[in-house]
Image: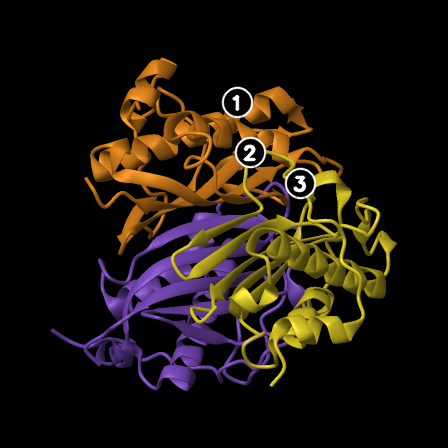
Chain colours: A orange, B yellow, C purple
Amino acid sequence: MSTPEENFAKLGLSLPPAPKPLGVYKPLLVDGNHCFVSGHGPVQDNGSLIIGRVGAGLSMEEGKLAARQVGLAIVATIKANLGSLNKIKRVVKVLGMVSCTNDFEKHPYIINGCSELFASIWGPDLGVGVRSAVGMGSLPGNIPVEIEAMFELNENI
Amino acid sequence: MSTPEENFAKLGLSLPPAPKPLGVYKPLLVDGNHCFVSGHGPVQDNGSLIIGRVGAGLSMEEGKLAARQVGLAIVATIKANLGSLNKIKRVVKVLGMVSCTNDFEKHPYIINGCSELFASIWGPDLGVGVRSAVGMGSLPGNIPVEIEAMFELNENI
Amino acid sequence: MSTPEENFAKLGLSLPPAPKPLGVYKPLLVDGNHCFVSGHGPVQDNGSLIIGRVGAGLSMEEGKLAARQVGLAIVATIKANLGSLNKIKRVVKVLGMVSCTNDFEKHPYIINGCSELFASIWGPDLGVGVRSAVGMGSLPGNIPVEIEAMFELNENI
């Protein structure tokens, strides 16, 4: 069975820099055998953020790619803070927030961009947790997607 | 003292089918002595969802009934995944999200539709946890209410 | 090293009354060595709420002050329920929700009003947890900020 690090390497995706906090918070906090990750935005490889609103400038596919980029930013934060993706045993909970027009209805499709990434890394069972995918009035810096997450840590590592 | 299952039976409410995931997530996840439930929508007995926006087509009473229906969908998910409502010791946390017009102010009244159901099942103390009740820009499939929850499991069962 | 209670006293801030629930929920719930706090609004010393929407009537500075007032309401709830701020070991997680216009982008600045208060009380490390700061379509009673939080309790007290 391959490890999360090996699974991620196979995807051939590049990692953005782990984002620095935009306010008074920590990007990641370990609490017992859990790890909480702050709301992350879609950080690109050059450190800039994808901006825009789904349904008003950004298409659904662009929104889903933005959510994947949020997932990559979370992965970067995990590696920067814990050293290895292998420290994570499983995904417990994801809150996926989409900045979109009021008539937008496909939030789950958008957030799948992040969830499918996590499932590729930690597997179809351990990589999939509970989730809410919802539409916000606005997000910081006009980003289209912000995601916070909670993971269970692997005790064996 | 009557059990949660007995309390629910006394209410005489019918249960909708436990909703299937609309994306890459689990409806419910057990983590130690806690149980996390994904954001649920107002599933009706025939499996369809109540749709609409509170303050724009849906009245406050209709919104509260939708929140109760979300609670029933959560109950259906608990029974489908854990087998019995008696496995739940108490409600820890509820996040109640209302899709409504920007000038809507009665989110707590809406979400009480779910919270009163939980209090009827698990009692006025154990059935009541912490809560936020807030207004979203939009929700998946144009549902008026989405609720996610965290419960503590009963060790004795 | 000074205690959280001493740190708070040094700030010279007055505490609003601990808010009564506006619905079927508890303001605070202890679960093992964690303490969950319901979504709080900006309660003022006379018990009334700051109301308005950031970007439409309320300025950014007024929004940040509202977030500090939410923090003070949370502090009041902690003292009313646990007796002392010293019972809290550290901040684990904050969800900061801002009611604002769709084009507003400075949510982290607003929520810092609460986070800086917590950092002053519990210190620059233990007083700072993970966080999401996001924009809502609306909030109960037309308040500009609602914040929910999770703390770790101090076992030594």
Q: Please name the residue that numbered disc 3 is placed on.
A: B20
Tag 1: amino acid? Leu
* Of the two numbered discs 2 and 1 in the rendering, the one whose residue sits closer to the viewer: 2
Q: Residue at x 48, y 42 (%)?
A: A129
* Closer to us: C22 or C55: C22
Give the quadrant of the N terminus of chain B.
bottom right
Sort mark 1 into few (<14), some (14-19) or many (20+) by Cα contacts within 10 Å.
Answer: many
Q: Which secondary structure lies at badge 1?
A: helix
Q: Residue at x 82, y 48 (%)?
A: B52
* Closer to us: B6 or A132: B6
* Closer to us: B97 or B50: B50
Contact check, label 2 and label 3, Cβ < 8 Å? no
Tag 3: amino acid? Lys
Position of C10 relative to A26 (above/below): below
Position of A116 relative to A134 (above/below): above
Judge whether residue B134 can be spotted in this image.
yes
Q: Please name the residue that numbered disc 2 is placed on.
A: B24
Q: Residue at x 19, y 77 (%)?
A: C156
**Rounded to the nearest whole Å, what is the CA distance between mark 2 and mark 3?**
11 Å
Position of B9 relative to A81 (above/below): below
Please tell me in which quadrant of the rendered image residue C58 appears.
bottom right
Q: Please name the residue that numbered disc 1 is placed on.
A: A65
* Left/right of residue A133 with respect to residue A104 in the rendered view: left
Where does residue C142 sit, x and y in percent of width and height?
Answer: 66, 64
